[in-house]
Amino acid sequence: MGAQHGRALVTGASSGIGAAYAARLAAGGWDTVLVARREQRLADVASRLREETGSAVETLVADLSDPGGLARVVERAGRDDIGFLLNNAGINGYGPFDELEPALMAKVIDVNVLAVTALARAAIPAMLRQGRGTVVNVASQLAFAGSLPPRPLPERAVYAGSKGYVVTFTRTLAAELAGSPLRLQVLCPGLTATEFHRSRGEEPVGGREQSVHADGGVPVDQVVDASLAALEDGRVVCVPGLPDATPVDGLSAAELAIRTAARGGHG
């Protein structure tokens, strides 16, 4: 079966939200390019998608914190056949900031900030040339939890900061591209039933079978449902489980009030 829509490039595609989103896109007529660190996991996901959907699936084994790995994915993302980019790969690096290993801190920023930005920069010019395209950047509800102390939330200064960047980057870029045919979204899930909390990110979780961390959370299919519904509605900020957009609208209003008041203070 040939693609009805083109190709979707999905990072972090070997488990969790990435694997579930890739499966939904493939079932909807997209061919896919799946990116992750774990070669065997990636091959298993690709085989399942081919068997269940008949779609064409490419795999690209890459660590997005490695400059060479990122460069290979950037090159693929910049080709004219990519019509959907899901920037889902992310690591947490949780822990007290004063004890956070510098190498892990850099890895969090490289994966959560640099890779998201570089892949969007690669894909969007090609999408604009084609006159269509969708970019979904996965952030986190922790992007909105800056002043809240840890316990029960994790110690998360760098992770939350990186996801705050993803929120602001996507919202600002969506405003810049508002007159274009492209759709942009920042997806901000809360605790989700994946294996995300089973590793801080130094190394991926081992084994071929997908698992769920002990904290549980919302099923991944509900997160994908919310994202796809928000795309149809044209909503840039998607917070799964949020009953209406009033809090998001309130955030925009608060930002405007801050800027307006600050300008007034200099008058």
Image (tube, helix red, strand yellow):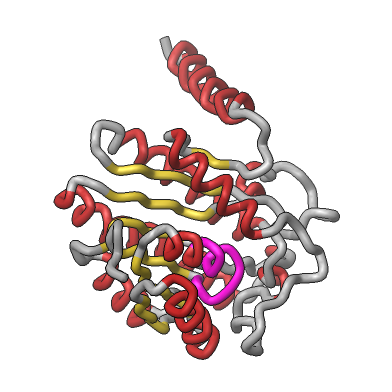
| Relative side of 155 to 90, left or right | right
Q: Which residues are magenta?
A: 13-21
Question: Principal SS element in the magenta part?
Answer: helix
Marks counted in the figure total 0
Question: Depth check: 170 or 107 in front?
Answer: 170
| Relative side of 55 to 245, left or right | left
Q: Is residue 149 magenta?
A: no
Q: Give percent across and percent down for residue 36.
A: 47, 78
| For residue 39, above or below residue 263 | below
| Relative side of 16 to 4, left or right | right
Residue 112 visible, this angle: no
Question: Depth check: 24 or 166 in front?
Answer: 24
Q: Give percent across and percent down for residue 227.
A: 52, 47
Task: Quadrant for the C terminus, please.
Answer: top left
- Residue 56, quarter of the rendered image: bottom left
Q: Give percent across and percent down for residue 74.
A: 29, 69
Q: Give percent across and percent down for residue 79.
A: 20, 66
The outermost residue toward the right is 151
Question: Depth check: 204 or 10 in front?
Answer: 10
- Residue 80, quarter of the rendered image: bottom left
| For residue 154, above or below residue 47 | above
| For residue 84, above or below residue 144 | below
The residue under the point 30% across, 78% down is 72
Q: Is residue 17 magenta?
A: yes
